Image (cartoon, rainbow, N blue to C red):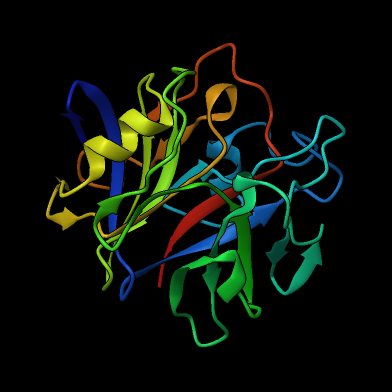
Amino acid sequence: MRTKLQGIAIEALIYDSRRCQAVVLDQKQGPGTTWPNARAAAASTGAIAAVNAGFFTPEGDPLGLVIAEGDRRGRINRASSLGSGFYALSSSGNPELLRRSAFKGAKEAVQSGPFLVERGRAVGGLSDQSSSARTFIATDGGSGWMVVRTGPCSLSQLASALEGASIGAIRVRTALNLDGGRSSELWVSDQVSGGGTHTRPIWNKPVRNFLAIKRL
């Protein structure tokens, strides 16, 4: 779906975690070595959507811990706000957005940050400088989840726009920023109502990993 929040363009896939699951797809050999874009990554696993995920170094290594199909790559980033949280999928299949300090392990996980919203409130102290495309994953605290790509905005602007907001029928309780700027990409299958979209500008760069949304 497409909408706007306080003038910020929003493109989102909304899903129910009782029916769909976000899994981590990581390219062990580095950005673009297995999948050139989100569409290709999604196709490799029969997913209905995919979004770019965690940050990575100039050398193509994860900037934080990534766990894909139980395989751990990188290590926990304890020094940067870009690693302040985790999207984690437990061995029982329960998805969570966790603070770095609360992460104890998972079947699938990707470290990213900063948090934009926690307990329904905008996180303070975020940058109001750089205006770039953003991607994030968010939940209503229950089974309502979304992956989102935005138009240009600062992290502070985005957090403020999300505070108390609903996208579709999902009220944002927790939102975790993913890699943005020239990494921001969202593909949604035409099997999804309102889908058949792939937002990836020609200036985008290959990324290290993706979150792919699969039906259960």
- Counting every numbered tag in the picture gives 0
- Quarter of the image with the C terminus is bottom left
Q: Is residue 156 left or right of residue 8?
A: right
Could you tell me which residue is drawn at 52 percent across and 43 percent down? 178
Taking the view exactly as shown, the residue that stands out farthest to the bottom is 92
Q: Which of 69 and 76 is in front in this view?
A: 76
Query: Which picture quadrant has residue 101?
Result: bottom right
> At which x and y percent is residue 127?
47, 29
Could you tell me which residue is drawn at 51 percent across and 46 percent down? 114
Residue 72 lies, with reference to residue 45, above or below; the image says below
Query: Which picture quadrant has residue 95?
Result: bottom left
**Residue 73, can we see it?**
yes
Q: Nearer the viewer, residue 11 or 57?
A: 57
- Quarter of the image with the N terminus is top left
**Residue 196, can we see it?**
no
Residue 179 lies, with reference to residue 8, above or below; the image says below
Taking the view exactly as shown, the residue that stands out farthest to the top is 203
Q: Which of 17 and 155 is in front in this view?
A: 155
Query: Which picture quadrant has residue 171?
Result: bottom left
